Image (cartoon, grey):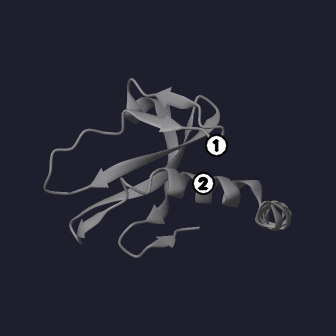
């Protein structure tokens, strides 16, 4: 029982840290997509990106491979984990920025 109280107090203290909402969301999204974020070689990798879709911020993974014919992302997620399906990624998603690089294992912002 004491372990549960210790866990609760620790989580309460950690949630009180001064991380901004976007940093918290970014960490959560990286953890959510961790199985998809891969660095197979310097010429083929999957990174985490952020963009704006119909006025809301969405996070998605995208494969970077100059020699491959890959499809653009079909879906993304908001910080509230609401799934958003893209019908035409190139026209619907704006202001796309890499936020986590799987090869360097570092945040881009």
Left or right of 28 in this view: 20: right
Tell me where residue 22 sits by quadrant: bottom right
Tell me where residue 24 sits by quadrant: bottom right
Which residue is outermost to the front?
1
Q: Quadrant of the C terminus?
A: bottom right
Q: Position of residue 47 (x, y in %)?
A: 39, 58
Left or right of 15 in this view: 22: left
Which of the marked residues, 1 or 2, is nearer the chain's N terminus?
2
Say whether marks 1 and 2 touch (CB < 8 Å): yes
Find numbered disc 2 in the image and state the secondary structure of the residue it sits on: helix
In the image, residue 57 sits, relative to residue 3, either above or below, namely above
In the image, residue 89 sits, relative to residue 40, either above or below, namely above
Left or right of 20 in this view: 72: left
Determine which residue is flagged by label 2.
28
Find numbered disc 1 in the image and state the secondary structure of the residue it sits on: loop
Q: Looking at the rendered structure, which numbered label has been put on residue 79?
A: 1
Tell me where residue 9 sits by quadrant: bottom right
Q: Residue at x 38, y 55 (%)?
A: 35
Q: Position of residue 90 (x, y in %)?
A: 38, 35
Which residue is outermost to the top?
87
Q: Quadrant of the N terminus?
A: bottom right
- Label 1 to label 2: alpha-carbon separation: 8 Å
Q: Looking at the rendered structure, which numbered label has been put on residue 106?
A: none
In the image, residue 85 sits, relative to residue 44, either above or below, namely above
Q: Residue at x 81, y 67 (%)?
A: 6
């Amino acid at each position: 029982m004491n372990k549960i109280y210790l866990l609760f107090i620790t989580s309460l203290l950690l949630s009180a840290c001064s991380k901004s909402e976007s940093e918290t969301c970014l960490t959560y999204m990286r953890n959510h997509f961790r199985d998809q974020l891969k660095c197979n070689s310097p010429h083929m990798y999957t990174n985490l990106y952020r963009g704006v879709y119909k006025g809301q911020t969405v996070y998605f993974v995208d494969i970077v491979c100059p020699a491959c014919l890959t499809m653009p992302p079909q879906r993304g997620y908001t910080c509230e984990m609401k799934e958003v399906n893209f019908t035409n990624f190139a026209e619907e998603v704006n202001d796309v920025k890499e936020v986590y690089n799987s090869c360097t294992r570092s945040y881009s912002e």
